[in-house]
Image (tube, grey):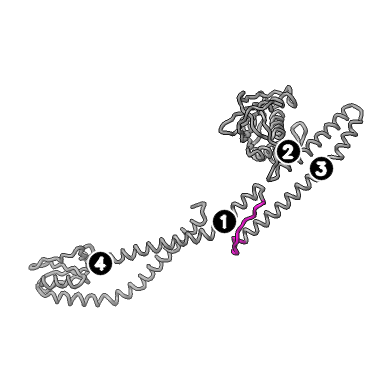
Amino acid sequence: MRHSLGLRLIVLFLALALAISCTFMFGMQRAFSTGWRDVIKPLVADYVDRLADDLGSPPDIARAQALTEKLPLSVEIDGPVVHWRSPTTRPQFMDEHPHELLVRTTADGHRIRFGLDSQAWMQRPRMIGWMTLTVLLMLTAVAWKLAHHLFGPLKAIGAGVERFGRGDFSQPIQLHRHDELGQLAEQVNTMAADLSGMLDAKRALLLAISHELRSPLTRARLNAELVPEGPERDALLRDLAEMRDLITSLIESERLAQPHVALQREPTDFSALVANLQAGPFIGKPLMVDIPADLPGAEVDRTRLTLLMRNLIDNALRHAVDAPQPPELQARLADGVLTVTLRDHGPGAPPEVLARLAEPFYRADAARQRATGGVGLGLYLCRLIAQAHGGSLRFEAADPGLRVVLNLPWSGTARPSPG
């Protein structure tokens, strides 16, 4: 009930209906009972006197029996001569609460007690109670249906907000209502359209800048090649290469961020892919690899998967420079999912940083120095590549160090050639 607004409204409706009914019944009972008691009491007393006189002295049992058969009454006679009680099914003589209004004493010492045979009276209120409960349950069902109808659009709004949060603005919230919920859906759609336009403008700007920078960057690199060899030339070429990699990462990230990413799938041997990285950019780097020899290949985008693994291994090596153990890479295949775990024994990351490691341009350290990494696009690209393949990428604290877990759909095929 804590998570259902409709259910809480139904409970509130029932509580309010019960409170109103009880208040009304109590008030009306108090209002009418006092006045009627003052009017009825002398009439009842006079009627009881007439009944006692009609029975005679000593009381006549035949008359008493005829009286109980004709009227819904119970009679009990207790005296020196007559001892008799009416044979009713459920007599009510008010034994527990004797009242002088219904008790009379004859001249010869007989005590006559009258009571109401309330069996019929009890059945009628019971029937009315069941009818009231049935009507109340029906009203509850109607109120539930009404609340479900009124607040049903909240599910559509929630699903739309979830889609917009994932970056999917292709389908607006379809809600044809003219009440407050309809206005809320229109406002959410307007907000989503504005966000989509802002994101499209940002992507277009990044792509335009990246494309425009490629030409002058190429010319700058050619001019740098003409500079005499020395530390200044090496530093210049290194900075230009870093700018080139940044532009390439920007363009690739924007391509992968599109809803429909065109992957160039081809048979890929994962163990051979990692071996090529060890023999290429990470030659001589300490890395412990545990990949089953019989791991089958799969149809994936080999170029992008290579970029993903290169960024992950580079990140692990960079943060494990002074660690007591080298990074550990492990791959396991189960139920069609390849789980790649890469753990380093470096300083790790605090919990509040783990959830943001794959955000674009995010770095745990404020100073963007070459010794600690680039501008924060490597892990972002890794996440986009994993998602484009239908997989996931998450970061966990390893204590010490950081553990990266990559899950990829991996339909086994014949092992392809390493090339």
Considering the numbered disc 2 on the image, is that residue within a helix, a strand or a loop?
loop
Residue type at numbered disc 2: Leu
Q: In this view of the protein, which residue sits in the foreground, 363 or 107?
A: 363
Q: In the rendered image, which quarter is residue 218 located in?
A: top right
- x%, y% of residue 5? 52, 56
Q: Which residue is mark 3?
A: 211
Q: In this view of the protein, which residue sits in the foreground, 161 or 211?
A: 211
Q: Nearer the viewer, mark 4 or mark 3?
A: 3
Residue type at numbered disc 1: Leu
The residue carrying pointer 4 sits among few (fewer than 14), some (14 to 19) or many (20 or more) residues within 10 Å by Cα, namely: few
Q: Which residue is mark 4?
A: 120
368 relative to 292, above or below = below
Residue type at numbered disc 3: His
- x%, y% of residue 62? 11, 71
**Residue 123 placement, left or right of 399:** left
Q: In the rendered image, which quarter is residue 109 located in?
A: bottom left
Q: Which residue is mark 1?
A: 154
- Which range is magenta? 169-182
**Residue 274 placement, left or right of 85:** right
Residue shown at the point (68%, 55%) measured from the top left: 191
The answer to whether the residue labelled 2 contacts the one labelled 1, judged by CB atoms less than 8 Å apart, is no
Q: Which residue is mark 2?
A: 377
The answer to whether the residue labelled 4 contacts the one labelled 1, judged by CB atoms less than 8 Å apart, is no
Alpha carbon separation for disc pair 2 and 4: 85 Å
- x%, y% of residue 35? 33, 75
